[in-house]
Amino acid sequence: MAAWGERLAGVRGVLLDISGVLYDGGEGGGEPIAGSVEAVARLKRSPLKVRFCTNESQKSRGDLVGLLRRLGFDISEGEVTAPAPATCLILKERGLRPHLLIHDGVRSEFDQIDTSNPNCVVIADAGESFSYQNMNKAFQVLMELENPVLLSLGKGRYYKETSGLLLDVGPYMKALEYACGIEAEVVGKPSPEFFKSALQEMGVEAHQAIMIGDDIVGDVGGAQRCGMRALQVRTGKYRPSDEHHPEVKADGYVDNLAEAVDLLLQHTDK
């Protein structure tokens, strides 16, 4: 690999994943990953632009930010690109009325959305609400539509909480795709539109930005396909096998966010 100075040259903006990079969720809200609170503070004191880019779909953006602030992070709602608000914009633009297969914690994001006589399905990380009955209802709605539309808030396979690894929305999305013979539209990482909207909000070009995440496919691969650079942290859902992924190679692997910030502050603008 090239020297860090070369790999980080010209970076003007940093996109940060949240779960598995800033904190691990869990009982009582979860806990910050060692060094990450101070790492975010240091980034924000630097000349670099910072934005948070998450696929979190069990909590509203307001609830997520409230939790992170209680854990000590300097973060506001306006700094977070999240899939639920982005999905609501798509629903309104396209006149879609969703059947919602989502977690109660994120339902408030859809309060202004017409859900009568649904002409699409929105699926998110519904957790315990992924019952046979609820999955089958979503399947039936899709099968009754002439042009079925399935919107998925991210397509992660799993994520990590303090109690261990948990299934994400991806496996359930794939089940509906398979049963209905359709392809879901993903709102969230690794969708290029999602990354582009975060870059636009941050005001930097893709080649000037770097993504820091724990998901080799969703964070690293997705960012690289948009022309960004990407680092993978060895926290959250990281597995040692990620460093030998057959298709995706990060621009660097770091032990945690604190190390990534050390390197960025040492090598950018040089």
Image: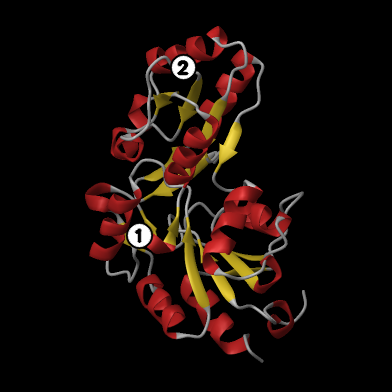
Q: Which mark is residue 5?
A: none
Residue 119: image location, x then y, percent? 50, 18
Instruction: Work out which quarter of the rendered image holds the N terminus and state it.
Output: bottom right
Q: Amino acid at mark 2?
A: Ala
Left or right position of 151 against 100? right
Residue 220: image location, x then y, percent? 64, 57
Res. 137 visible in picture: yes
Residue depicted at 29% across the width and 38% down the height: 108
Tell which circle, 1 or 2, labels the residue nearer the N-terminal end.
1
Residue 227: image location, x then y, percent? 73, 62
Element under label 1?
A: helix
Q: Which residue is mark 2?
A: 138
Element under label 2?
A: helix
Residue 185: image location, x then y, percent? 60, 33
Q: Which mark is residue 77?
A: 1
Q: Which sits in the foreground, 162 or 126?
A: 126
Left or right position of 16 against 32? right
Give the CA distance from mark 1 to mark 2.
30 Å
Q: Within 10 Å of the Cα at label 1, are there few (<14), some (14-19), or many (20+) other Cα atoms? A: some
Q: Within 10 Å of the Cα at label 2, are there few (<14), some (14-19), or many (20+) other Cα atoms? A: some
Q: Tell me if residue 37 comes above or below residue 102 in the rendering.
A: below
Q: Amino acid at mark 1?
A: Glu
